[in-house]
Amino acid sequence: MLRARGDPLRLVGVERNMCGVSIVDDIDRGIVAFLRRDGRATFAEIGAAVGLSAPATKRRVDRLVADGAISGFTAIVDPHALGWDTEAYVEVAYNGVVSPSRLRADYTGIAEVVSAWTVSGVADAVVHVLARDVRHLEETIQRIRGLPDVTGTQTEIVLSRLFQRSPD
């Protein structure tokens, strides 16, 4: 592969999808899988697992980050260890048409909402809420219900998390 002029991370001849992100190969998938298991691994450790040198592994990781295939590195924290013992998914319905940017603005200001999605069906959004206890959850749901144009909510409280993963 040849380096693209002016961009040391982009390679000429690398196939890209419609969004401009390079299409990953089996080595890239191996690197991502290793990083998902151990985000603090060294490039030498990752390289040994996928058959590359540490510098070649670093170049691959840098490219995956630059292309957006890897959007960041983070610690995975057990919410219960921090006192967040209640978890729920709340379906939220709005009056009329609501844009994703409006939903994002509504929910980024509520610290207990840890993620949110637009959805099809009766609800306009589903939000994932973490709370200290049921009383705290109820207070959070009341804040959600108090948002302009919210017409109703449906809450599902998580009893136990069986597993969580993302696709390889």
Image (cartoon, rainbow, N blue to C red):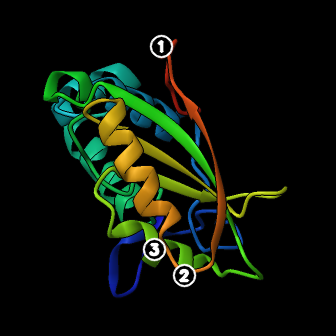
Label 3: state its secondary structure.
helix
The nearer-to-camera label among 3 and 2 is: 3
Identify which amino acid the numbered label 2 is placed on: Ser
Please name whichever residue, 136 or 9, is drawn nearer the observer in this view of the structure: 136
Q: Tell me the kind of residue under disc 1.
A: Ser
Image position of 117 (left or right of 121): left
154 relative to 23, above or below: above
- Which residue corresponds to mark 2? 101
> Would you place residue 116 above or below residue 30 in this image?
below
Q: Gap between marks 2 and 1, in whole Å? A: 31 Å
Task: Give whichever of 134, 29 is nearer the camera.
Answer: 134
Q: Earlier in the sequence, mark 2 or mark 1?
A: 2
The residue depicted at 38 percent of the width and 40 percent of the height is: 137
**Which residue is label 3 attached to?**
106
Q: Is residue 135 visible?
A: yes
- Callout 3 amino acid: Asp
Mark positioned earlier in the residue sequence (1 or 3)? 3
The quadrant where residue 15 appears: bottom right
Q: Which mark is residue 12?
A: none
Q: Are marks 1 and 3 in contact (CB under 8 Å)?
A: no
Q: Is residue 168 visible?
A: no
Which residue: 33% across, 62% down?
110
Q: Nearer the viewer, residue 135 or 131?
A: 135
Name the residue beneath numbered marker 1.
Answer: 160
Q: Mark 2 or mark 3, which is nearer the start of the sequence?
A: 2
Q: Residue at x 47, y 61 (%)?
A: 144
